[in-house]
Image (spheres, rainbow, N blue to C red):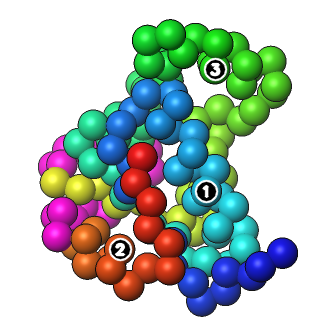
């Protein structure tokens, strides 16, 4: 296994559909577990994932995914957020003033995430 110690991972969540929510959360948990500094940033359409009333709805035709994740026993979006938070992943909301959430979040402007991504070892957006 490659250790990600002293590595920086920046994930930018741009959408809130079920199939867009899982990949960045899984990568965040995996990277922070390997010792990386992880920033999980949420854009205007991705920030819904952080809302306490968020319901993960798949895109049109994606109901099979929700059923498959349930049948497989995959952790929920909220469980992944909880794990990420407990492990030290930074939650950052981009260009959004009020987000009703229980998570500790930072608020930043878009240029901040672009600067952070410039010196990241891994930058991915979903």
Give the CA separation, mark 3 to mark 1: 18 Å
Residue 50 or 17: which is nearer the viewer?
17
Residue 20 rendering spot, x and y as whole percentages: 47, 36
Magenta stretch mostly in which secondary structure? loop
Residue 74 rendering spot, x and y as whole percentages: 75, 32
* Nearest to N terminus: mark 2 or mark 1: 1
Residue drawn at x 84%, y 75% is 1
Q: Is residue 72 above or below residue 24?
A: above
Residue 117 rendering spot, x and y as whole percentages: 35, 74
Find disc 1 in the rendering and name its residue: 27
* Nearest to N terminus: mark 2 or mark 3: 3
Find disc 3 in the rendering and name its residue: 65
Q: Is residue 42 above or below residue 55?
A: below
Q: Is residue 52 magenta?
A: no
Residue 106 or 49: which is nearer the viewer?
49
In the displayed image of the protein, which residue is found farthest to the front?
61
Residue 36 rendering spot, x and y as whole percentages: 61, 77
Q: What's the magenta region? A: 96-111
Answer whether labels 2 and 3 touch (C-beta < 8 Å): no
Disc number at residue 117?
Answer: 2
Residue drawn at x 63%, y 50% is 26
């Amino acid at each position: 296994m490659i250790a990600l110690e002293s590595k920086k991972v920046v994930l930018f969540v741009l959408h809130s559909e079920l199939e867009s929510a899982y990949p960045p959360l899984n990568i965040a948990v995996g990277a922070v577990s390997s010792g990386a500094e992880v920033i999980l940033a949420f854009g205007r359409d991705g920030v819904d994932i952080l809302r306490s009333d968020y319901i993960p709805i798949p895109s049109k035709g994606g109901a099979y995914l929700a059923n498959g994740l349930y049948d497989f026993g995959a952790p929920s979006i909220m469980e992944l957020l909880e794990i990420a938070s407990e492990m030290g992943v930074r939650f950052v909301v981009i260009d959004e003033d009020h987000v009703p959430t229980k998570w500790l979040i930072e608020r930043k402007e878009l240029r901040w995430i672009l600067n952070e991504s410039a010196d990241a070892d891994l930058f991915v957006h979903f």
